[in-house]
Image (spheres, rainbow, N blue to C red):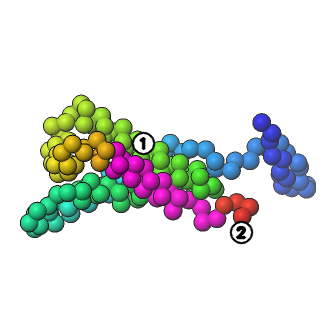
Protein backbone atom coordinates (compact mmCIF):
# COMPACT_ATOMS: atom_id res chain seq x y z
CA UNK A 1 0.00 0.00 0.00
CA UNK A 2 1.47 3.35 -0.98
CA UNK A 3 1.58 6.15 1.51
CA UNK A 4 0.79 9.75 0.70
CA UNK A 5 3.68 12.10 1.31
CA UNK A 6 2.91 15.46 2.79
CA UNK A 7 4.76 18.48 4.10
CA UNK A 8 5.16 18.59 7.84
CA UNK A 9 5.63 22.18 9.06
CA UNK A 10 8.41 22.78 11.58
CA UNK A 11 9.97 25.86 13.15
CA UNK A 12 12.83 25.74 10.62
CA UNK A 13 10.92 25.13 7.41
CA UNK A 14 9.13 21.99 6.41
CA UNK A 15 9.93 18.32 6.09
CA UNK A 16 8.57 15.86 3.59
CA UNK A 17 7.23 13.00 5.62
CA UNK A 18 5.78 9.58 4.86
CA UNK A 19 3.05 10.05 7.41
CA UNK A 20 -0.10 8.29 6.26
CA UNK A 21 -2.98 10.63 5.51
CA UNK A 22 -6.40 9.43 6.57
CA UNK A 23 -9.23 10.18 4.21
CA UNK A 24 -11.96 8.93 6.53
CA UNK A 25 -12.84 6.06 4.23
CA UNK A 26 -13.24 3.35 6.86
CA UNK A 27 -16.37 2.17 8.58
CA UNK A 28 -16.88 3.75 11.99
CA UNK A 29 -18.52 1.13 14.20
CA UNK A 30 -19.10 3.68 16.93
CA UNK A 31 -21.13 5.77 14.50
CA UNK A 32 -23.06 2.66 13.40
CA UNK A 33 -23.92 1.73 17.00
CA UNK A 34 -25.01 5.26 17.86
CA UNK A 35 -26.99 5.43 14.60
CA UNK A 36 -28.76 2.20 15.61
CA UNK A 37 -29.61 3.64 19.02
CA UNK A 38 -30.94 6.79 17.38
CA UNK A 39 -33.02 4.65 15.02
CA UNK A 40 -34.61 2.80 17.94
CA UNK A 41 -35.13 6.10 19.75
CA UNK A 42 -36.89 7.53 16.69
CA UNK A 43 -39.03 4.42 16.32
CA UNK A 44 -40.50 4.66 19.82
CA UNK A 45 -42.30 8.02 19.37
CA UNK A 46 -43.39 7.02 15.86
CA UNK A 47 -44.91 3.82 17.25
CA UNK A 48 -46.64 5.69 20.08
CA UNK A 49 -47.94 8.28 17.62
CA UNK A 50 -49.28 5.49 15.39
CA UNK A 51 -51.04 3.85 18.33
CA UNK A 52 -52.71 7.16 19.16
CA UNK A 53 -53.80 7.75 15.57
CA UNK A 54 -54.84 4.11 15.03
CA UNK A 55 -57.13 4.30 18.06
CA UNK A 56 -59.10 7.06 16.35
CA UNK A 57 -59.33 5.30 12.98
CA UNK A 58 -62.28 3.00 12.19
CA UNK A 59 -60.10 0.29 10.57
CA UNK A 60 -56.41 0.73 11.45
CA UNK A 61 -53.86 -1.64 10.02
CA UNK A 62 -52.81 -2.57 6.54
CA UNK A 63 -49.29 -1.69 5.53
CA UNK A 64 -49.10 1.56 7.49
CA UNK A 65 -47.61 0.04 10.64
CA UNK A 66 -44.94 -1.57 8.48
CA UNK A 67 -44.00 1.81 6.98
CA UNK A 68 -43.24 3.32 10.40
CA UNK A 69 -39.62 2.12 10.50
CA UNK A 70 -38.74 3.91 7.26
CA UNK A 71 -38.39 7.46 8.69
CA UNK A 72 -36.57 6.02 11.71
CA UNK A 73 -34.14 4.19 9.40
CA UNK A 74 -33.57 7.34 7.35
CA UNK A 75 -32.74 9.18 10.58
CA UNK A 76 -30.51 6.34 11.78
CA UNK A 77 -28.57 6.22 8.49
CA UNK A 78 -28.24 10.01 8.44
CA UNK A 79 -26.98 10.02 12.04
CA UNK A 80 -24.42 7.28 11.45
CA UNK A 81 -23.03 8.93 8.31
CA UNK A 82 -22.90 12.36 9.94
CA UNK A 83 -21.16 11.03 13.04
CA UNK A 84 -18.64 9.12 10.94
CA UNK A 85 -17.66 12.29 9.09
CA UNK A 86 -16.69 10.38 5.97
CA UNK A 87 -15.54 12.21 2.87
CA UNK A 88 -17.22 9.85 0.38
CA UNK A 89 -20.91 9.29 -0.33
CA UNK A 90 -20.47 5.56 -0.92
CA UNK A 91 -18.96 5.10 2.55
CA UNK A 92 -21.72 7.28 4.02
CA UNK A 93 -24.35 5.05 2.38
CA UNK A 94 -22.58 1.98 3.74
CA UNK A 95 -22.88 3.44 7.24
CA UNK A 96 -26.65 3.56 6.70
CA UNK A 97 -26.64 -0.02 5.39
CA UNK A 98 -24.63 -1.16 8.42
CA UNK A 99 -27.20 0.45 10.76
CA UNK A 100 -30.00 -1.33 8.86
CA UNK A 101 -28.18 -4.66 9.14
CA UNK A 102 -27.59 -4.16 12.87
CA UNK A 103 -31.25 -3.34 13.53
CA UNK A 104 -32.43 -6.20 11.29
CA UNK A 105 -30.35 -8.68 13.29
CA UNK A 106 -31.76 -7.31 16.56
CA UNK A 107 -35.38 -7.47 15.35
CA UNK A 108 -34.89 -10.94 13.86
CA UNK A 109 -33.34 -12.19 17.09
CA UNK A 110 -36.26 -10.73 19.03
CA UNK A 111 -38.72 -12.44 16.68
CA UNK A 112 -36.96 -15.80 17.09
CA UNK A 113 -36.06 -15.78 20.79
CA UNK A 114 -38.76 -13.55 22.29
CA UNK A 115 -41.81 -13.50 19.98
CA UNK A 116 -44.20 -12.80 22.87
CA UNK A 117 -42.29 -9.67 23.81
CA UNK A 118 -42.18 -8.47 20.22
CA UNK A 119 -45.93 -9.12 19.92
CA UNK A 120 -46.58 -7.02 23.04
CA UNK A 121 -44.43 -4.16 21.76
CA UNK A 122 -45.72 -4.15 18.16
CA UNK A 123 -49.11 -5.95 18.08
CA UNK A 124 -49.94 -4.41 14.69
CA UNK A 125 -47.41 -6.62 12.89
CA UNK A 126 -49.48 -9.81 13.26
CA UNK A 127 -52.17 -8.85 10.78
CA UNK A 128 -50.10 -6.44 8.71
CA UNK A 129 -49.35 -8.78 5.80
CA UNK A 130 -52.27 -10.36 3.94
CA UNK A 131 -52.68 -14.11 4.37
CA UNK A 132 -50.44 -16.06 2.06
CA UNK A 133 -48.35 -13.02 1.16
CA UNK A 134 -46.53 -12.60 4.47
CA UNK A 135 -43.00 -13.46 3.37
CA UNK A 136 -42.96 -11.40 0.14
CA UNK A 137 -44.49 -8.39 1.91
CA UNK A 138 -42.07 -8.60 4.83
CA UNK A 139 -39.15 -9.11 2.45
CA UNK A 140 -40.19 -6.08 0.42
CA UNK A 141 -40.46 -4.00 3.58
CA UNK A 142 -37.00 -5.17 4.69
CA UNK A 143 -35.57 -4.04 1.33
CA UNK A 144 -37.44 -0.74 1.63
CA UNK A 145 -35.76 -0.32 5.02
CA UNK A 146 -32.38 -1.04 3.43
CA UNK A 147 -32.92 1.67 0.82
CA UNK A 148 -34.25 4.11 3.45
CA UNK A 149 -31.16 3.63 5.64
CA UNK A 150 -28.81 3.96 2.64
CA UNK A 151 -30.63 7.12 1.53
CA UNK A 152 -30.30 8.54 5.03
CA UNK A 153 -26.59 7.72 4.91
CA UNK A 154 -26.20 9.52 1.59
CA UNK A 155 -28.05 12.56 2.95
CA UNK A 156 -25.83 12.54 6.04
CA UNK A 157 -22.66 12.21 3.98
CA UNK A 158 -20.66 14.91 2.27
CA UNK A 159 -22.38 17.45 0.04
CA UNK A 160 -19.83 16.89 -2.74
CA UNK A 161 -17.34 14.15 -3.47
CA UNK A 162 -13.68 15.09 -3.13
CA UNK A 163 -12.23 16.14 -6.44
CA UNK A 164 -15.63 16.78 -8.04
CA UNK A 165 -17.20 20.16 -8.65
Distance Cα–Cα, label 1 vs label 2 = 32 Å
Residue 47 visible here: no
- Choose the circle earlier in sequence order: 1 or 2: 1
Image coordinates of residue 144 in percent, x first then y, are: 39, 53
* Residue 124, label in figure: none
Q: Do the residues labelled 1 and 2 touch (CB within 8 Å)?
A: no
| 127 shown above or below 45 | above
Q: Which of 38 and 133 is in front in this view?
A: 133
Inspect the magenta stretch and tell me whether residue 33 lies in it.
no
The quarter of the picture where residue 26 lies is top right
Residue under label 2: 165
Residue 84: x %, y % from top left: 54, 52
The residue to which callout 1 is attached is: 101
In percent of width and height, residue 1 lies at: 77, 36
Q: Quadrant of the C terminus?
A: bottom right
Residue 143, can we see it?
yes
15 versus 113 height, above or below: below
Q: What stretch is highlighted in magenta?
A: 139-160
* Residue name at image x 42 percent, y 42 percent: 101
In the displayed structure, would residue 123 be above or below residue 157? Answer: above
Q: In this view, does 78 lie to the left or right of 68?
A: right
Residue at x 88%, y 48% (from the top left corner) = 16
What residue is drawn where x is 70% and y is 47%? 22
Amino acid sequence: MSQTLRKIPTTRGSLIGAEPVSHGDGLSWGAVLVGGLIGVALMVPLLLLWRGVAGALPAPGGLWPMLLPLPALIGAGWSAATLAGTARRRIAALHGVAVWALLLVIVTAAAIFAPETLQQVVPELVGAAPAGLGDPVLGTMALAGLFAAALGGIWGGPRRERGRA
